[in-house]
Image (cartoon, grey):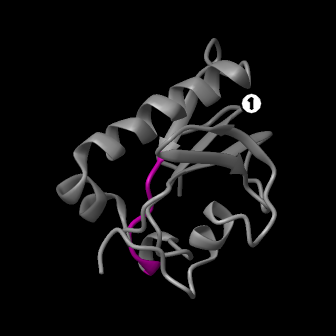
């Protein structure tokens, strides 16, 4: 069922505390933790505690939680001191776009120049 934890989902296991993560922020609806394969000096993932396979399905079903992810992305950027020089918030959707964990999540990237387009 949409929104319910999935037994085979890495991020659902992080939310449940079954898999360790370097958590930098947590709210009632989100968890933010450091990416294990960082693509920038600051690379933090912000995930909803509820399970949806991608950002679009989360936003359609629970727009308030989708908003919470963006709010937390901004707070992560403040905490990590990357606001002044700029940062990027990325939602990958589908394997062709680089999504490897099918649980909605935002990447907060910063701490170096981030040219556009990203590749």
Q: Which residues are magenta?
A: 90-95
Question: What is the residue that sits farthest to the top in this orientation?
Answer: 84
Crowding near the residue tagged with mark 1, few <14, some 14–19, many ≥20 C-alpha atoms within 10 Å:
some
Q: Position of residue 90 (x, y in %)?
A: 48, 48
Q: Residue furthest left?
A: 60
User: What's the residue at 33%, 37% (across, down)?
Assistant: 67
Q: Is residue 65 above or below residue 71?
A: below
In this view, 35 is above or below 77: below
Measuring from the top left, give residue 5's x and y in whole percent: 47, 74
Is residue 116 something one can see in this rendering? no
Image mark count? 1
- Most foreground residue, 58 or 109: 58
Q: Is residue 19 left or right of residue 1?
A: right
Q: Quadrant of the N terminus?
A: bottom left
Tell me the residue at 72%/18% (across/down): 81
Q: Which residue lies under the disc numbered 1?
A: 111
Q: Quadrant of residue 55?
A: bottom left
Q: Which secondary structure dominates the residues rendered in magenta? A: loop
**Residue in view at x 47 percent, y 69 percent:** 103
Assign a secondary structure to mark 1: loop
Q: Is residue 6 above or below residue 80?
A: below
Residue beneath the point at 74% across and 72% down: 18
Whether residue 30 is in magenta: the answer is no
Pinpoint residue 87: horizontal percent, then vertical percent. Answer: 58, 30
- Residue 48 vs residue 110: left or right? left
Left or right of 103 on screen, residue 55: left
Q: Nearer the viewer, residue 42 or 75?
A: 75
Can residue 110 be seen here? The reply is yes
Q: Nearer the viewer, residue 58 or 117?
A: 58
Q: Position of residue 42 (x, y in %)?
A: 75, 38
Up the image or down, 36 lies above or below 45; here it is below
């Amino acid at each position: 069922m949409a929104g319910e934890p999935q037994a085979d989902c890495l991020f659902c296991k992080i939310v449940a505390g079954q898999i360790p993560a370097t958590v930098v922020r947590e709210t009632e609806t989100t968890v933010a933790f450091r990416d294990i394969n960082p693509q920038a000096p600051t690379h933090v993932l912000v995930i909803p505690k509820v399970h949806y396979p991608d950002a679009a399905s989360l936003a359609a079903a629970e727009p308030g939680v989708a908003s919470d992810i963006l709010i937390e992305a901004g707070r992560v950027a403040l905490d990590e001191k990357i606001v002044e020089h700029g940062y990027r918030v990325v939602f990958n959707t589908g394997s062709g776009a680089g999504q490897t964990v099918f649980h909605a999540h935002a990447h907060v990237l910063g701490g170096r120049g981030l040219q556009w387009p990203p590749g």
